[in-house]
Image (spheres, rainbow, N blue to C red):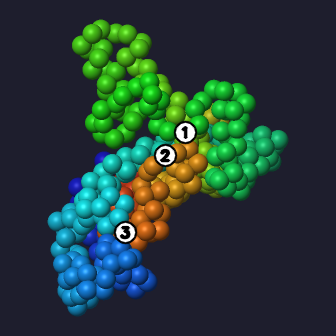
């Protein structure tokens, strides 16, 4: 059981981390070339109008005044308004529309990686130096080595163009279905809609047609991310399990007559998972910020694509808000990793 004190201490540690990230982001954007007022006013605007925009936004204030105002706004969850991408639209509104797309993609990709990577790592470790082990290691090495900008088009070619099984882009068949957003997670929203229609009109397989369409559209991008995640997890699981198998308590359990499978699953897996959880947490945080290529290949407009667009056009509030959200999500993932640690090994709470 995880103690409240342990969680409270971890939550308090998030504050200086987020404060540091906010400071670094503010400093980098202040040092970056370009003038936000010029971006807002337009390249053909007069210098007098640019100066007027600077005064309205407070960009002519001393740097420490701007920094204080920035921290005060962030503390109130006010990330400003977009300059160019969606002019005069609150950044929080833009992120609220884009963030669920990336979270959903990262979640399913990581789920595939976990469901495949952990069993493959265990099988590889238990069958060390056999043909099974060699094939698993080669597959993991290939998964790590293949870049997403190559594996994405490859899975599209195989599963869509050649086999014709799955769609190539988008989140749902927009021509056939119209979905009212509830959570922003397309698979969740379509499932909720199907349940609501079933409650109202009775069960009909057609009620869940949008859900299955959303799942079909999610498989290929999630698989593209999941291949890389699976490779990392399986390699770490193999290494960790091999180390655990050689421990004295594992030999003792076997010497007492306990079966190999029971020994591994009951005594070995729990301890072997601790370093693997670290990889899973870091990888999930990286997927939240690094799904740009996958989103581009499959035409999914998530937060990663938004960040790239904001950098290209100099939309500083969107850049700041996106990076801060990335940092916040990453710290939450690390908190989840710490809590999982304490569940697997209660001694960590000490």
Q: Secondary structure at mark 3?
A: loop
**Residue most toward the right?**
131
Q: Residue at x 37, y 77 (%)?
A: 44
Q: Position of residue 175 (x, y in %)?
A: 45, 28
**Which residue does the numbered mark 1 point to in the structure image?**
169
Q: Secondary structure at mark 1?
A: loop
Q: Residue at x 34, y 9 (%)?
A: 203
Is residue 114 something one can see in this rendering?
no
Q: Is residue 155 left or right of residue 9?
A: right
Q: Secondary structure at mark 2?
A: loop
Q: Tell me: residue 170, above or below residue 342.
A: above
Q: Residue at x 19, y 70 (%)?
A: 73
**Which residue does the numbered mark 2 point to in the structure image?**
300
- Point out the tag, 1 or 3, that comes first from the N-terminus: 1
Which one is nearer the viewer's eye here, 316 or 191? 316
- Tell me whether the residue at label 1 lies in contact with that at label 2, contact meaning CB atoms closer than 8 angstroms: yes
């Amino acid at each position: 059981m995880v103690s409240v004190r342990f969680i409270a201490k971890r939550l308090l540690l998030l504050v200086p981390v987020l404060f540091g990230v906010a400071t670094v982001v503010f400093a980098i954007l202040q040092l970056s070339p370009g003038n936000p007022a010029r971006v807002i006013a337009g390249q053909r605007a007069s210098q007098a109008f640019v100066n007027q925009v600077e005064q309205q936004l407070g960009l002519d204030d001393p740097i420490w005044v701007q920094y204080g105002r920035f921290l005060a706004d962030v503390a109130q969850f006010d990330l400003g308004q977009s300059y160019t991408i969606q002019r005069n639209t609150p950044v929080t509104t833009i992120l609220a529309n884009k963030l669920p797309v990336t979270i959903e993609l990262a979640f399913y990709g990581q789920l595939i990686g976990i469901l495949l990577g952990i069993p493959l790592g265990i099988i590889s470790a238990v069958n060390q130096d056999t043909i099974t082990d060699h094939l698993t290691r080669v597959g993991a090495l290939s998964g790590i080595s293949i870049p997403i900008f190559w594996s994405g088009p490859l899975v599209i070619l195989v599963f869509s163009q050649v086999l014709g099984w799955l769609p190539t882009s988008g989140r749902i068949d927009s021509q056939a279905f119209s979905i009212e957003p509830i959570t922003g997670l397309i698979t969740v929203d379509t499932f909720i809609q199907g349940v609501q229609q079933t409650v109202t009109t009775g069960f009909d397989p057609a009620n869940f047609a949008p859900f299955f369409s959303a799942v079909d559209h999610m498989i290929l991008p999630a698989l593209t991310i999941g291949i890389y995640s699976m490779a990392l997890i399986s390699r770490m699981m193999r290494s960790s399990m091999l180390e655990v198998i050689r421990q004295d308590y594992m030999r003792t359990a076997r010497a007492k007559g306990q079966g190999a499978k029971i020994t591994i699953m009951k005594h070995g897996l729990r301890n072997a998972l601790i370093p693997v959880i670290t990889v899973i947490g870091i990888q999930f945080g990286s997927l939240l910020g690094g799904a740009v290529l996958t989103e581009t290949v499959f035409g999914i407009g998530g937060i990663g694509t938004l960040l790239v667009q904001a950098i290209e056009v100099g939309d500083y509030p969107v850049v700041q808000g996106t990076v801060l959200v990335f940092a916040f999500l990453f710290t939450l993932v690390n908190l989840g990793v710490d809590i999982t640690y304490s569940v697997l090994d209660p001694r960590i709470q000490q």
